[in-house]
Amino acid sequence: MSATTSVSNEPMNSSSFELRNPATGVTSELPVRSGTIGPQVLDIAHLARDQGVFTFDPGYSVTASCDSKITYIDGDAGVLLYRGYPVDQLAEKSSFMEVAYLLILGELPTAPQLQAFSDSITRHTMINESLLRFFNGFYHNAHPMAMVSAVVASMSAFYHDSMDIYNPRHREIFSHRIIAKLPTIAAAAHKHALGQPFIYPRNDLNYCSNLLNMFFAVPCESYEINPVAAKALDLLFVLHADHEQNASTSTVRLAGSTGANPYAAISAGVAALWGPAHGGANEAVLAMLEQIGTVENIPKYLAMAKDKSSHFRLMGFGHRVYKNFDPRAKIIRETCHEVLAKLGRQDSPLFELALRLEEIALKDEYFVSRKLYPNVDFYSGIIYSALGIPRSMFTVMFAIARTVGWVAHWLEMISDPAMRIGRPRQLYTGPQQRNYVPIALRKR
């Protein structure tokens, strides 16, 4: 904003702020919009038209890009609500399929509604054989996220008969298909990396049990699904189902705002989630634990984490949004200890190291004063590892859960009559206009 433009310190009234440009004498009224809970926002939609200026907000950290009824976060209070329901209540009493229904349709289902929804998801779990053969074209050590992103995008070539984004029935079919098929695609990526045969989905298993069977079963012998593992996976999926306008969700919305087919939008979300600063954080936790190596090395690495000149970071501690505690971490911590105990993994050196690091860091004044508590990524990585899921698949598991949130946000955006294509602006700092110089005349 130019130095000659000012905003009053007080609202003109209870519903707007005044912005006046002394150089032009132009005055603009910035309406104040209020949600049901949370901070108010200034509506600056007409700022460029009225004043000829943009706002500058790198990373969009204080910009509300849309209004949404899906998820609410209060980072200071450690609150996470899905459609108004606290995540701790849902984690304790609900299931991933019920949470999926809630996020997509807005209300908790009745028993018949949940059964019909779950049955529909189950009946859509198989993928086209031609699509399954795509995996044979990937190199044997391709990262699973690369495969998942590519195959999800390719789904549009198989289901083009039901991709009218303005047709409510087509949107419903897409929603069920993508949620149902992501575990099958993920498991195929895992099996391809191992060089093992693909395992087909089973309609007699629930969502998480089916995923575990496709991951770990082999044709030559029967596989017994551990109910502890299935329950832990279901809880992780509930906690990861949505997290408001994060990077990958915003990517899905931005891609979807162009009118692109929904599989392309979800594929874009998968790619955004892959980043180590986003969905790859739990993978980084295990890498950090391996770097620390032994319990005896913990003090040395904690000292390095406190040293600003050191490049070592304590991964899985603290959170950009939650300033006091991550409500998901409080829930998953108990499950983490329970899973390790029931699966007999507490004696593993890696898990012993993780638990000791947690214990020591929670008592260290440096980390306590800065509110650097273990977050959901710290515990989820440990649980996935305890379940036998390889580190390269951690972010894929995150993608399976978060697909529900992506679908909910895509549906909300597409059905909004006021939807517009996303078009962020910029502060240009490059050269001013200059004339072309023939190459023979250029000097350096």
Image (cartoon, rainbow, N blue to C red):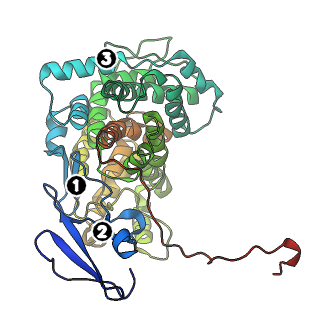
**Residue in the image at 27% along x and 42% along y:** 239
Asked whether, in this view, residue 401 is left or right of residue 311, the answer is left
The nearer-to-camera label among 1 and 3 is 1
First-in-chain label (1 vs 2): 1
**Residue in the image at 34% along x and 15% along y:** 123
Q: Nearer the viewer, residue 187 or 163?
A: 163
**Residue in the image at 25% along x and 29% along y:** 97
Report how far apart the C-alphas of labels 3 and 2 lie in the structure: 43 Å
Dot 2 falls on a residue whose secondary structure is helix
Which mark, residue 367?
2
Q: Nearer the viewer, residue 173 or 336?
A: 173
Amino acid type assigned to the residue bearing label 1 in the image: Ile
Amino acid type assigned to the residue bearing label 2 in the image: Phe
Image quarter in which the C terminus is found: bottom right
Q: Nearer the viewer, residue 2 or 138?
A: 2
* 248, above or below 344, in the image: below
**Residue in the image at 23% along x and 60% along y:** 75
Question: What residue is disc 1 on?
Answer: 73
Dot 3 falls on a residue whose secondary structure is loop
Report how far apart the C-alphas of labels 1 and 3 lie in the structure: 33 Å
Contact between marks 1 and 3 (CB within 8 A): the answer is no
How far across and down, in percent of the image, does residue 358 sit? 31, 56
